[in-house]
Image: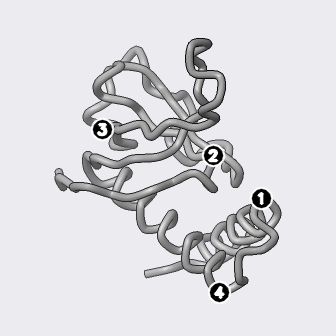
Amino acid sequence: MTTKIDLKRIATMAHRINEAHPTLPWSECWKRAWDLHWFRQMLLNGIAHFRYYKENDDPAQKNIRYVLRKARGTLLMDVIPEAKRPKGGPYRYPNFKNMSYYDLDKDDWRSFDVTRFQIIERFIPK
């Protein structure tokens, strides 16, 4: 069930996507915002394998601005080690520009710009 808070989060995310990509049709901004909302729900309920674009920090490849990063992450507190859990839980400070997740491969917190989200490859519910 989608709450008023969820709808506000989705609308704000759609606006952020529209600000980053002004040529994108408004309907596509809404679609991406809804996709990110459901993706966040997946992270809260299990482990997701997904891809997103991150800025290239390799000095040897100056002409490539973004690289595709594969990640395996979650927001499920049972999976995150006790020492790495946020004090306020996964809902504490909503950020509509970035999406944070716990990277199970790097064993640390990571985030990505919501406009650079690519695809969910697999979801493992817990």
Mark 1 touches mark 3? (CB < 8 Å): no
The kind of secondary structure element at disc 3 is: strand
Q: The residue under label 1 is which amino acid type?
A: Ala
Q: Choose between 57 and 97: the one closer to the eye.
A: 57
Disc 1 target residue: 20
- Looking at the image, residue 25 sits to the left or right of residue 80; the answer is right
Alpha carbon distance from label 2 to label 1: 10 Å
Type of amino acid at the residue the image marks with label 3: Arg
Q: CA distance from mark 1 to mark 3?
A: 25 Å
Mark 4 secondary-structure assignment: helix
Q: Position of residue 117 (x, y in %)?
A: 51, 54
Residue 68 in picture, x, y percent from top left: 44, 40
Mark 1 or mark 4, which is nearer the start of the sequence? Answer: 1
Q: Are marks 2 and 1 in contact (CB under 8 Å)?
A: yes
Q: Write down the residue under mark 2.
A: 113
| Residue nearest the viewer, comparing 99 with 77 | 99
Give the mark, 4 or 3, whose residue is nearer the N terminus: 4
Q: Which residue is mark 4?
A: 27
- Picture coordinates of residue 87, whole percent (x, y): 54, 28
Q: Give the label, 2 or 1, closer to the camera.
A: 1
Packing grade of label 4 (10 A; few <14, some 14-19, many >=20) is: few
In the picture of the structure, the residue carrying the numbered disc 3 is 72
At 26% from the left and 55% from the top, the residue drawn is 121
Q: CA distance from mark 2 to mark 4?
A: 19 Å
For the residue labelled by badge 1, is the local secondary structure a helix, a strand or a loop? helix
Q: Is residue 66 above or below residue 25?
A: above
Which one is earlier in the sequence, the residue at label 2 or at label 1? 1
Between the residue at mark 3 and the residue at mark 2, the CA separation in whole angstroms equals 16 Å
Amino acid type of the residue that numbered disc 4 sits on in the rendered structure: Ser
